[in-house]
Amino acid sequence: MDWCPLRLTTPVKQHLFGGRAIPDRLGRTGLPAGRIAETWEVSDVPGDGARVREGPLAGLSLRELTERDPEGLVGRGWRGPRFPLLTKYIDATGPLPVHLHADDEAARGQGEPNGKTEAWHVLAAEPGATALAGVEPGVHRERLRRALLEQDFDAVMRRLPLSAGQTLYVPAGTLHSFGPGTLVYEIEQTSDLQEHAMRHRMEDGSALGDDQWRANIDALLAQWRPSPRPDFVPGLRLPVGDGVDRVFLCAGPHFALERWRVRAGAVLDRPFDTAHVLSNAGAPVSFDLGDDRTREELGRARTVLLPAALGRVRIHGPADVLAGYLPDLTHDVRRPLSAAGYGPAVVSALGEGLS
């Protein structure tokens, strides 16, 4: 493949909980009128898969590229039926439904290749904003069922305060929600499997019949994992050099997410051997692939997918970029953070598989 930076089409979800924070606060252009709940920045979800918008690979789907050259795109000998990362901006002007996602085992039972572990990085939050994440210790299945039927989520779930800059790693099978008044960037496994406990559809708020609602709760309880009780973390800063701030936000077997801030006049030079999803959290930023002849611009709240075969990116300041990738946990996460002086317990708080 003649690889280049991939700018992809972006499915947009206008669910009930959305508002206008993505265009109005982040500055994203080209979005439809009305509620914007989610923009799917990189997606290989069936029915919502992305295609390349421009350049020599224009018109090809992310699925086609993944199938044609999985190592060139994803890297490290990776093989799989779908591109492994799904990333989104999510505007929870209203609260998301209380829901969970299947883990890998439950997903395979439904004919899907994998479930969905996810993480949220909070970009903005109104004072007093909270999230629901996991259940309180001692909550058993029947007690949870009663609370869900009564729609009394606070009786059984952990309500956590949140603020901008924090990140929460949410293992599959964890009951959760966030909002209102919250704007996040989400990275997750490529899946759209979910079960929610609400009496209405999240798309438009229309009521569910009792039989459907109770069936949804039964399906949710069958996939519920009681043990995960994730907490927000501020991230771990890795010294890079003058004018460059690299922060590890979360990491696990399915993805890692970092935030790169670069002051004006400085450059972050990052070699890589696995695909990188770069999403802009600030003003327009310029980047190149190792020499100024390839310099390109990434607009406000826009995303570019860098195939593994490209091998290097330089981010020119001023910049505020989120970088998601499929990690080698030892090489990419444990080793550099340990060298920077972080102990095992601090590193393991970033996600799963780091103990």
Image (tube, rainbow, N blue to C red):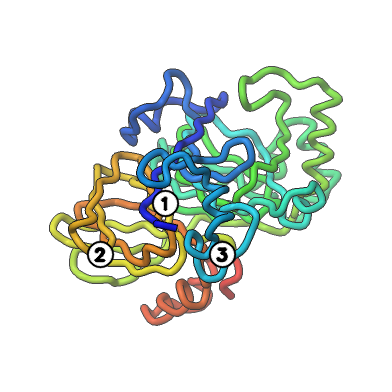
Q: Give the residue type that dot 2 points to.
A: Gly
Q: Which label belongs to residue 252?
A: 3
Name the element at disc 2: loop
Task: Residue 263: give x, y in percent of width and height.
Answer: 19, 57
Residue 164 appears anywhere in the view: no
The residue drawn where x is 21% and y is 63% is 291
Name the element at disc 1: strand
Task: Residue 108: give x, y in percent of width and height.
Answer: 78, 53
214 horizontally vs 298: left or right: right
Sequence-wise, which precedes: disc 1 or disc 2?
2
- Determine contact: label 1, label 2, CB under 8 Å: no
Q: CA distance from mark 3 to mark 2?
A: 28 Å
Name the element at disc 3: loop
Can you say whether 282 is above or below 4 in the image?
Answer: above
Viewer-proximal residue among 137 and 286:
286
Q: Give the residue type that dot 1 points to.
A: Leu
Viewer-proximal residue among 253 and 30:
30
Sequence-wise, which precedes: disc 1 or disc 3?
3
Q: Which label belongs to residue 290?
A: 2
The residue drawn where x is 57% and y is 48% is 63
Task: Residue 303: give x, y in percent of width and height.
Answer: 38, 45
Q: Quadrant of the N terminus?
A: bottom left
The residue drawn where x is 45% and y is 50% is 121
Task: Residue 37: give x, y in percent of width and height.
Answer: 50, 30
User: On the image, numbered disc 1 is attached to which residue?
Assistant: 305
227 horizontally vs 118: left or right: right
Q: Quadrant of the C terminus?
A: bottom right
Q: CA distance from mark 1 to mark 2?
A: 16 Å
* Dot 3 crowding, Cα within 10 Å, few <14, some 14–19, many 20+: many
